[in-house]
Image: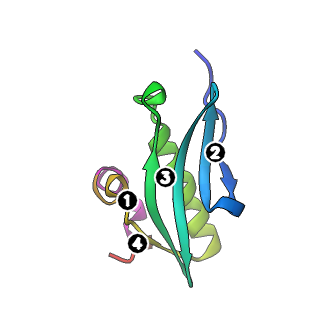
Amino acid sequence: MSTTPDVTHDAANSRFVLAIDGDEATLQYRRAGQAIDLFSTYVPESLRGRGLAEKLCKTAFEYAKSQGLTVIPSCSYISGAYLKRHPEYQALTTR
C-alpha cells in the first residue's frame, strides 16, 4: 500500500492540495480578516474512500489554529460530517 503524500498549502491559489497519481484533492478557502472561510472540499472519484478529505480538513484547521484564525465552515462536508467527527475543532469555528 502506498503512503499518502503530505498536504501542501498552495497559498497563492488559496487552497490546500493532495496530489496523487496525477489527480488533485483540494480544499479551497478565502481569507476574511482574521477568519478563513473553508468553502469547497473536492476529492476526485478515483481517490475517494481513502480519507483524503479528512486529511485536507485537519491540515486546514491546524493551519488556522497556528495562525490565530477563526474558521468559517461554509463547505457542507466540513460543517456536517467533519466537525461531527472532530468536535475538538468546533471552538475554532464561527458558527
Residue under label 3:
57
Q: Are marks 1 and 3 in contact (CB under 8 Å)?
A: no
Q: Residue furthest bottom?
A: 33
Q: Residue at x 40, y 61 (%)?
A: 88
Q: Is residue 39 magenta?
A: no
In what element is the residue under mark 3? helix
- The picture quadrant where one finds residue 5 is top right
- Crowd rating for badge 3 (residues with CA inside 10 Å; few <14, some 14–19, many 20+): many
**Is 29 left, or right, of 95 in this rendering?**
right
- The picture quadrant where one finds residue 12 is bottom right
- Crowd rating for badge 2 (residues with CA inside 10 Å; few <14, some 14–19, many 20+): some
Q: Residue at x 46, y 39 (%)?
A: 43
Residue under label 2:
7
Distance of label 4 from label 2 (alpha carbons): 21 Å
Q: Position of residue 14 (x, y in %)?
A: 62, 62
Residue under label 1:
75
Q: Residue at x 54, y 47 (%)?
A: 26
- Crowd rating for badge 4 (residues with CA inside 10 Å; few <14, some 14–19, many 20+): some
In what element is the residue under mark 1? loop
- Type of the residue with mark 2: Val
Q: Residue at x 42, y 63 (%)?
A: 89
The N terminus is located in which quarter?
top right
Mark nearer the N terminus (3 vs 2):
2
Mark nearer the N terminus (4 vs 2):
2
Distance of label 4 from label 3 (alpha carbons): 13 Å
Distance of label 1 from label 3 (alpha carbons): 10 Å
In what element is the residue under mark 2? loop
What is the span of residues highlighted in magenta in the rendered image? 81-91
Residue under label 4:
93
- Type of the residue with mark 4: Thr
